[in-house]
Amino acid sequence: MTRDEIQLGEVRRLAPRLRPRPDQGEPCTVVCCGHRSEHELSIFISWTALQSLRNHLGSDSEVELAGVLVGDQCHDDQARPFVVVTHSLAAQDYENSSGRFTFTHSTWDLIARQVDQLSSGGRIIGWYHSHPGWGVFLSDRDHFICEHFFSGAFDIAIVVDSQRNQLGLFHRSSLSSGGMRPATACTVFAPSEEGRELPAEGFPDPLRFFAGSSGEAVGGEQ
Ligand SMILES: [Zn+2]
C-alpha cells in the first residue's frame, strides 16, 4: 500500500485549547463507560454523534463503512487534555471494493465542507469505521491510516463490529509512543437543555461497548 492509495487530504493541526470539560460546563446528562486509567486520554462523546455513527455503520452490516469524528481537542484549567466528539460525519461517495472503503478526494472535499458548515464549529479529530463480523481491532491498514492521516497526539479512532454490536475506542497513550491503543473508558454526554435523555434501550453496556475490557482480543492483528 502506498500513501497515494488513500487520499484523505490535509487535516488541520491546532493546539489544544482551554475549555471546561463537558461534565463540568453546561448542564448535561453524563454516562461513564468503563474505567479510565491514569495515563489514558479523557474522551467525551455526544450521544447524538454516537447514535449517528452506529446508525451509519449499521445501515449495511455486510461491508466496511467509514466516516470522520468532529469535535475539539482541549485541556482543562489544570492542563489535563481531553477530547470531545460532537459530530460524526459519514463518508459519502467513497470507493468500496471488496468490502474495503477507500476515501477519495471528492469524499474528503465533501466532509471538509460539512465540517465548515457546522454551526457549532469543530475540527476533524479522528475517524471511525466498521468491521462487519471481524471483531474490534486496528488492522495494519487501519494503523497506516492512523499514522498518516490522524497522527495528532489526541486524534482518536472508533471501530465498530456492526454484526456483533461491539464498539472500541483507540487513542495514543501518554505512556507509550507509536500507534493507537484501545481505550478502556469514555464518557457519553447529552446536553440537558435540549431535554434529551439518554435512552436505556439501545445503549451499549460498558463491557459490550468496550470490547477491550471484556477480555476479547482487541488492538492486535487479525
Ligand atoms: Zn479496520
Image: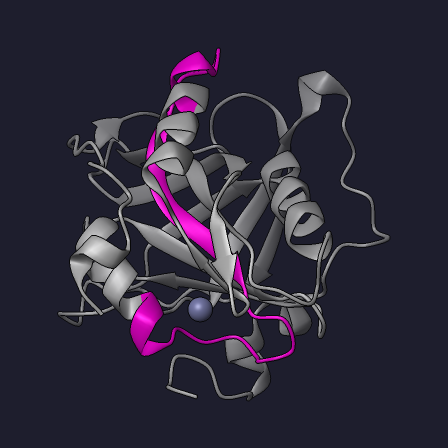
Q: Residue at x 62, y 29 (%)?
A: 28
Dividing the picture into quarters, in which one does residue 165 lie?
bottom right
Q: Which residues are magenta?
A: 115-142
Q: Position of residue 122 (x, y in %)?
A: 38, 24
Q: Is residue 94 visible?
A: yes
Q: Nearer the viewer, residue 17 or 148?
A: 148
Q: Position of residue 49 (x, y in %)?
A: 59, 38
Q: Which residue: 81% across, 54% down?
A: 202
Q: Is residue 185 left or right of residue 203?
A: left
Residue situated in front as seen by the camera: 150 or 35? 150
Q: Is residue 217 above or below residue 148?
A: below
The image shows residue 143 at horizontal and vertical percentages of 28, 68
Q: Residue at x 44, y 42 (%)?
A: 68
- For the point 36% across and 47% down, the residue is 126
Judged left or right of residue 172, residue 23 is right
Q: Residue furthest right?
A: 201
Quadrant housing residue 70: top left
Asked if residue 136 is among those painted magenta in the image, a careful observer would answer yes
- The quadrant in which the C terminus is found is bottom left
Q: Is residue 184 magenta?
A: no
Q: Quadrant of the N terminus?
A: bottom left
207 shown above or below 85: below
Ligand 1 resides in the quarter of the picture at: bottom left
- Camera-nearest residue between 6 and 114: 6
Q: How many numbered tags mark residues here?
A: 0
Expressed as whole percent of the image width and height from the top left, the position of residue 25 reads 48, 24
Instruction: Say above or below: 202 vs 137.
Output: above
Between 150 and 171, the one lying in front of the other is 150
- Say if residue 172 shows up in the picture: no
Image color mode: one colour
